[in-house]
Image (cartoon, rainbow, N blue to C red):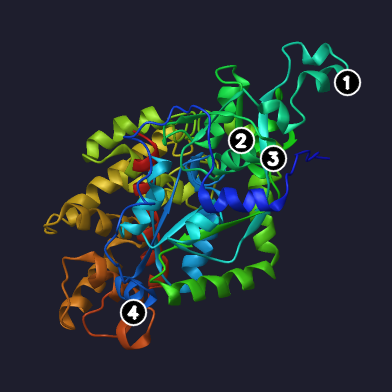
C-alpha cells in the first residue's frame, strides 16, 4: 500500500500561496525553454465541432511515452492513442496526431491553434483553467516522490531501506528535485515549500524530457529525485526495481484533456463520450493494458521494436529497405502494407488461401514465377513484383501520393475493381485520377446494385468499404512510422 505522509500547515497559508505566489529555491530554469502561455495574448481561435466536422478530422496534440503514444512491433499503441481512436470513431471523424516534442510548449501549441485538443495526462489546476477548458477527468492520481533505493538494497532489511529513504517531505529541505518547469509537479513543489517552511532546490529540465525519462535518470543515478503521477511511477517501478515511489506529496488530482475555451460544442461531445465510456468495460481494459499490466510493460520496454528505445519496425527491416528501393518507395510504406496484410507473421494464411507476410495467392505466385512463397524473402519478392505491375497499371496518375493510393487499393481488391471505380467517378462528374475524395467514394458505391450494375462497370459487386479503409489505414500507419522511425 502506498503511504502518503506530508505535513500540512493551516489552509490560510496555502490559500495565500496560491493567490500571491510562492518563494522558491534556486532552480535551473532556462528562459529560452520556459513556457510563455501564462503571459501571451493569443488571437481568438474559433474552431468548434462544426468546423472540425467540415474539416473531417480531429487534430489531437500528445507526446511520446511508453503509456501515451508509441510504436511497438509495427503497431501504434498507447493509452491516449487508443482513447483518441475510440473518440474519433464516436465523433465520426478521422484522427490526426500532432506530437509535442517539447512538453513546455504543449499548451502553447493548443492556444495557437495547432490542434483541437491536448490528449495527454494533464492535472487540472487553477492556473491552467484560466487559459483552457478541461474535459471531465478520465482518471485520478496523486503525485509521489521518485527516489533511488540504496545500492545494496537487495541485501538490506526493510527497516534499513526505510531509514535511508525520504518519508517525510520535511526531509526534502535542501534537496534538489528535477522536474519540467511547466509540469504540475513544479507548482506542487513550490506549494510544498510553503507548507514545510523551507527551500527545496527545484532544478528545471528541458521540455523534451518526459517524466519517464526523469524516472530512468533517477534509476541510473544521474539525478537523485523527481516527481511523477503515481500511475506513471508505479508502472515504471515494475521495470526499474531500484526506485521507490511510496512517498506521496499531494492529495488526489484530476487528470483530464484540455481544449480551448472557444470549443464548447466539442467539449460537450467529448464529455458525453467520457460518460458513455465510463459505463463500458473497454474503458477500464484500455487503462489496465497500460497502467496495470506490468509484464506487458516490461516486455515492450526491453524490446528493440519499442520506439521509445529502439528504431526497428520488424525483424525484416533490412530486407524491406532493399526491396523498397526496387519500387522507389519509402521502406516504411512497404512495412505498413505488410503489417496490414499479416502483422509481420510469415505463417498466417487467409480464409481465401493467401499466404505469408504479403498474403500472396498461389495463383499470383504462379503468374509471377515465384516458388516457395512460404519463405519470407520469397514472399516479399513476390509481393514487390506484383506492386511493380500495379505501378505500370497506374502510370497515368500524375500525383505520386495519389498513385500510391491507387496501387494500395489495387493490391487489396484487384485493379479491375479500381478501374471500375475510376470509370464511375468520371461518368458522374468526379476525377478519375484522384483517389482522395474522388475515386475512394466510388469504390464504396460498388456495393450498391445501382452502381455495380452500371454499364461502365465490368467487374460487378465489390465490398468497397474494406478497400477504402485499407488504403486509409496503411497510409495512416505509414505517417506514424515516419514520426517514430527514421
Residue 64's spot in the image, x, y percent? 46, 41
Q: How many labels does the image show?
A: 4
Question: Visible in this render: residue 106?
Answer: yes
Residue drawn at point x = 65 percent, y = 34 percent: 236
Q: Residue at left 46%, top 43%? A: 182
Q: Of callouts 3 and 4, which one flags the residue occurring earlier in the amino acid sequence? A: 3
- In 3D space, how far apart are the residues under numbered discs 1 and 4 (Cα atoms)? 71 Å
| Residue farthest toward the bottom in the current orientation of the protein | 450
From where the camera sits, is residue 460 visible? no
Q: Which of marks 2 and 4 is nearer the N terminus?
A: 2
Q: What element carries label 4?
A: helix
Q: What element carries label 1?
A: helix
The label on residue 159 is: 1
Cα–Cα span, label 2 and label 4: 55 Å
**In the rendered image, which residue does mark 3 sit on?**
249
Q: Which residue carries the number 2 mark?
A: 227
Q: Nearer the viewer, residue 119 or 5?
A: 5
Q: Position of residue 255 (x, y in %)?
A: 60, 55
Front of the two marks 1 and 4: 1
Residue on which the image places disc 4: 445
Q: Which of 238 and 438 is in front in this view?
A: 238
Mark 3–mark 4 Cα distance, whole angstroms, equals 59 Å
Marks 1 and 3, how far apart in space? Answer: 21 Å
- N-terminal of the two: label 3 or label 2? 2
Q: Dot 3, crowdedness within 10 Å: few (<14), some or many (≥20)?
A: many
Q: Give the Cα separation between the discs numbered 2 and 1.
A: 23 Å
Image spot of residue 256 (x, y percent): 56, 58
Amino acid at each position: 500500500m502506498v503511504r502518503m505522509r506530508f505535513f500540512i500547515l493551516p489552509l490560510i497559508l496555502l490559500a495565500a500561496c496560491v493567490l500571491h505566489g510562492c518563494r522558491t529555491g534556486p532552480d535551473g530554469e532556462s528562459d529560452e525553454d520556459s513556457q510563455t502561455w501564462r503571459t501571451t495574448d493569443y488571437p481568438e481561435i474559433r474552431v468548434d465541432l462544426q468546423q472540425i466536422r467540415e474539416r473531417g478530422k480531429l487534430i489531437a496534440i500528445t507526446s511520446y511515452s511508453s503509456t501515451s503514444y508509441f510504436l511497438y512491433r509495427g503497431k501504434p499503441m498507447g493509452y491516449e492513442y487508443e482513447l483518441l481512436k475510440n473518440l474519433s470513431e464516436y465523433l465520426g471523424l478521422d484522427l490526426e496526431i500532432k506530437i509535442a516534442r517539447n512538453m513546455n510548449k504543449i499548451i502553447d501549441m493548443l492556444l495557437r491553434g495547432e490542434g483541437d485538443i491536448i490528449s495527454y495526462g494533464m492535472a487540472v489546476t487553477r492556473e491552467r483553467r484560466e487559459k483552457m477548458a478541461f474535459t471531465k477527468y478520465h482518471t485520478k492520481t496523486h503525485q509521489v516522490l521518485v527516489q533511488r533505493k540504496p545500492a545494496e538494497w537487495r541485501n538490506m532489511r526493510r527497516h534499513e531501506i526505510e531509514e535511508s529513504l525520504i518519508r517525510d517531505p520535511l526531509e526534502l529541505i535542501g534537496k534538489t528535485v528535477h522536474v519540467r518547469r511547466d509540469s504540475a509537479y513544479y507548482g506542487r513543489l513550490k506549494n510544498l515549500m510553503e507548507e514545510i517552511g523551507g527551500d527545496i532546490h527545484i532544478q528545471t529540465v528541458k521540455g523534451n524530457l518526459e517524466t519517464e525519462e526523469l524516472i530512468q535518470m533517477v534509476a541510473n543515478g544521474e539525478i537523485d529525485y523527481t516527481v511523477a503521477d503515481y500511475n506513471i511511477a508505479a508502472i515504471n517501478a515494475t521495470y526499474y526495481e531500484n526506485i521507490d515511489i511510496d512517498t506521496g506529496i499531494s492529495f488526489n488530482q484530476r487528470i483530464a484533456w484540455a481544449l480551448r475555451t472557444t470549443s464548447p460544442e466539442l467539449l460537450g461531445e467529448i464529455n458525453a463520450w467520457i460518460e458513455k465510456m465510463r459505463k463500458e468495460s473497454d474503458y477500464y481494459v484500455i487503462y489496465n493494458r497500460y497502467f496495470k499490466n506490468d509484464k506487458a510493460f516490461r516486455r515492450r520496454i526491453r524490446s528493440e521494436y519499442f520506439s521509445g528505445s529502439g528504431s526497428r519496425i520488424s525483424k525484416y527491416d533490412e530486407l524491406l529497405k532493399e526491396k523498397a528501393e526496387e519500387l522507389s518507395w519509402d521502406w516504411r510504406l512497404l512495412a505498413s502494407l505488410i503489417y496490414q496484410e499479416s502483422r509481420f507473421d510469415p505463417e498466417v494464411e487467409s480464409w481465401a488461401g493467401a499466404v505469408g507476410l504479403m498474403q500472396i495467392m498461389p495463383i499470383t505466385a504462379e503468374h509471377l514465377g515465384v516458388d516457395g512463397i512460404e519463405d519470407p524473402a520469397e514472399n516479399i519478392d513476390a509481393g514487390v513484383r506484383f506492386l511493380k505491375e500495379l505501378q505500370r497499371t497506374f502510370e497515368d496518375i500524375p500525383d505520386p501520393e495519389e498513385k500510391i493510393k491507387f496501387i494500395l487499393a489495387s493490391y487489396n481488391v484487384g485493379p479491375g475493381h479500381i478501374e471500375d471505380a475510376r470509370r464511375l467517378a468520371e461518368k458522374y462528374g468526379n476525377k478519375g485520377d484522384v483517389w482522395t475524395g474522388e475515386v475512394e467514394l466510388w469504390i464504396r458505391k460498388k456495393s450498391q446494385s445501382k452502381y455495380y450494375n452500371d454499364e461502365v462497370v465490368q467487374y460487378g459487386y465489390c465490398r468497397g468499404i474494406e478497400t477504402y479503409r485499407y488504403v486509409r489505414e496503411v497510409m495512416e500507419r505509414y505517417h506514424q512510422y515516419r514520426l517514430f522511425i527514421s
